[in-house]
Amino acid sequence: MTIFDERIEQLRKEMDSKKIDFYLIPTADDHSSEYISDFYKVRNYYAGFTGSAGTLLIGMDMAGLWTDGRYFIQAENQLAGSRVQLFRMGSAGIPTVSEYLKEHLPEGGTLAFDGQVVDLAQGEGYEELLLSKHGRLLWDRDLAGSLWTGRPERSAETVYILDEKYAGKSRREKLSELRRYMKEKGGDRVLLSSLEDIAWLMNLRGSDVSHTPVFLSFALVGQDTVWLYADSRAFPDAVTDTLAKDGIILKPYMEIYDELKRLSEGKLMYDSSKVNYALCQCVPKTVSVVLTDIHEMIPKAVKNDVELDNLRRGHIKDGVAVTKFMYWLKTNVGKIPMTEISASDYLENLRSRIDTYVDLSFTTISAYKANAAMMHYSATPETDAALEPSGMLLVDSGGQYYEGTTDITRTFVLGEISGEEKKHFTLVAKSMLNLANAKFLYGCTGYTLDILARSPLWKLGIDYQCGTGHGVGYLLSVHEGPNGFRWKPVAGRNDSAVLEAGMITTDEPGVYIEGSHGIRTENELICVEDEKNEYGQFMRFEMLTWAPIDLDGIDTRWLNPEDIEQLNTYHRMVYEKISPYLEEEEREWLKKYTRPMGVEQSF
């Protein structure tokens, strides 16, 4: 029995004493965040699985972990030896959590969870399920968390102001726009719970969540006053005074729950997917609730001109770091000792020297050979593979800068690779460029365009079990809705919005062959307007990411003339934008790795 099995048994004893049949532990915090601080990693504590997405369901004679395709291999490895069963979400014949409960929860049974970490939409779904079973729903206690020995405290790191030269719009302007929206919809107050939305609205940033510069908080926005619920220890006096001038009053973090109970009338607006179940249970029946779309209230996905100009500059700085890393890696592999972790550390050090650097945008994925087949592999001292002059190294990384958030993946050829690996490498590059060079009519979504990236791989009978791309925040979360690229809807992934000018989306197709290799090539794209004619408004993408695609992995036999022209055009721009910031030796090397490819060439 593993330590995780022992912890589950301890929880089962508490469940039995309270007549609970199933206990649900999602990967979440009070704010429906994708990435969570250590205080909220209850699922990790009971299952030992460290991926950023997954739901643990514990019954008296079962324990199951539901996670998506990004984490199948990782979950399988981390759950090995435990009694927790892996449920591969989206796979044929695999029930959802709700479907499993519908089948296995006994008539009149009890389901329990911490209502503060389950969003309203999910909570209401479980309500309906329990109603159909004539059962009982317990949501008002963090039973699993209360048994966690040595649980960390909630974070309260220092909050700072994001200058308007980076934000592009003042706090007062953003609040005025939100209040106009409230009036149009007939609302008296807006309840905000999502950390990125509050940080964006307030032009504030923090560091309560690893690699995501946000701070734990709730906000209640009225027509004249904003009540900001957060830990006052995180706010320097200068920040508190500045907020007060804009009518923003700081209150204790947990007081939001009691204050909602004290509301007696009026209309309260919120997005049901961005507030937790417990919050909404606190709202009195005398208060009218107006459900709305968070992306209409907080339009942070459409970057303003100042943000876009900053992002263009920031991505060149980031691209220089990645290019210098590629030069170091490919000229030194086999000559000096290096591993997955030491390579990742070298790249982090290059980024940290950038004048506007704040943090990484996520934990770097540095995955050699077969490790790269795990989409979200994370090297540990136990798995840290030594790099040799053979095979490929996949590095997915990014930075947080005052000029915005970056996310880039490159797969580097370190020596001899097979013909199949070259074919896969080449077609992944083709797939990325196919989508990046799309021209389309306004009204398209990521569902419409995803086929442009998948088609070259589908022709081989290959797929990657994740979306092709996601929206990116501005010095916020590296994953941001409502835009994205994927070929079919996925529950809980609200990323199917119409692509608007100013949205940033990643473009990251890949090939993952378990036990052999993984390849991903990722750029960020800005959606921009193109020509407008009798057929409507055409749109296209502007490339935002600039770093070489390793030509040592390209076999032009798998490319047509248009593909080669797209690759050459991209590399011409990489050299133009990156070379002025390199040393002479690096510049000469970059010239080789951005050289024009021809149809006649074959490696």
Image (tube, helix red, strand yellow):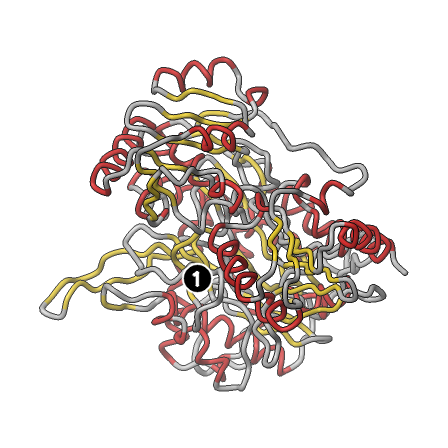
Determine crowd level at label 1: few under 14, some 14-19, many 20+ residues with C-alpha closer than 10 A: many
Residue 450 in the image: state x and y as whole percent. Answer: 40, 71
Residue 341 in the image: state x and y as whole percent. Answer: 73, 51
Q: Secondary structure at mark 1?
A: helix
Residue 503 in the image: state x and y as whole percent. Answer: 34, 52
Question: Would residue 186 be seen by someone viewing this image from the given angle?
Answer: yes
Q: Name the residue that disc number 1 marks.
A: 571
Q: Is residue 532 left or right of residue 583?
A: left
Q: Nearer the viewer, residue 189 or 140?
A: 140
What residue is shown at x 83% (from left), y 64% (from top)?
Answer: 82
Q: Is residue 209 left or right of residue 316?
A: right
Question: In the rendered structure, which amino acid carries the disc numbered 1?
Answer: His
Q: Nearer the viewer, residue 386 or 274?
A: 274
Q: Is residue 445 above or below residue 458?
A: above
Residue 114 in the image: state x and y as whole percent. Answer: 62, 46
What residue is shown at x 52% (from left), y 26% (from top)?
Answer: 159
Quarter of the image that includes the N terminus: bottom right
Residue 62, located in which quarter of the rendered image? bottom right
What residue is shown at x 26% (from left), y 68% (from top)?
Answer: 440
Q: Nearer the viewer, residue 166 or 561?
A: 166
Q: Nearer the viewer, residue 205 or 541?
A: 205
Question: Would residue 319 be seen by someone viewing this image from the given angle?
Answer: no
Q: Is residue 124 above or below residue 519?
A: above
